[in-house]
Image (tube, helix red, strand yellow):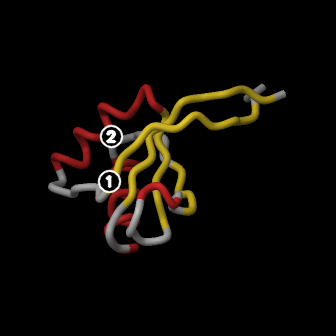
């Protein structure tokens, strides 16, 4: 079975920035999944980061503390498999 979940997607201007952000978020103990950058993020590198909605505030704080700014940020609903 699967379910609909809400996520925040972050886009970055360079692949280096996206990979650095991934390291920062993982070091903060947050769940982060690299995904292909959705077209609605506009002109960004090909990698975006997906974070569960309930962790978005912590992700924002971790990125702010590292002085790393996302080029784009938006919320999505996505289907994910149930974890059993």
Q: Quadrant of the C terminus?
A: top right
The image shows residue 31 at horizontal and vertical percentages of 48, 41
| Disc 1, SS | helix
> Which numbered disc covers residue 59?
2
The image shows residue 70 at horizontal and vertical percentages of 29, 55
Q: Is residue 3 above or below residue 10?
A: above
Residue farthest right in this picture: 1
* Left or right for 21, reference 61: right
The image shows residue 25 at horizontal and vertical percentages of 36, 48
The image shows residue 41 at horizontal and vertical percentages of 42, 57
* Label 2 CA crowd tier, 10 Å (few <14, some 14–19, many 20+): many
Residue at x 45%, y 47% (from the top left corner): 9
Which residue corresponds to mark 1?
A: 24
Which one is nearer the viewer's eye here, 62 or 74?
74
| Disc 2, SS | helix
Q: Is residue 60 above or below residue 5?
A: below
> Which numbered disc covers residue 80?
none
Residue at x 78%, y 29% (from the top left corner): 2
Which one is nearer the viewer's eye here, 39 or 7?
39
Residue at x 67%, y 28% (from the top left corner): 4
Q: Quadrant of the N terminus?
A: top right
* Left or right for 79, reference 34: right
Give whichever of discs 2 and 1 has the lower sequence position: 1
* Label 1 CA crowd tier, 10 Å (few <14, some 14–19, many 20+): some
């Amino acid at each position: 079975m699967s379910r609909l979940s809400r996520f925040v997607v972050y886009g970055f201007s360079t692949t280096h920035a996206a990979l650095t952000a991934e390291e920062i978020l993982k070091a903060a103990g947050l769940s982060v999944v690299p995904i292909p950058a959705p077209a609605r993020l506009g002109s960004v590198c090909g990698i975006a980061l997906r974070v569960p909605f309930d962790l978005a505030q912590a992700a924002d704080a971790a990125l702010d503390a590292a002085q790393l700014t996302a080029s784009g940020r938006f919320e999505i609903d996505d289907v994910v498999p149930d974890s059993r």
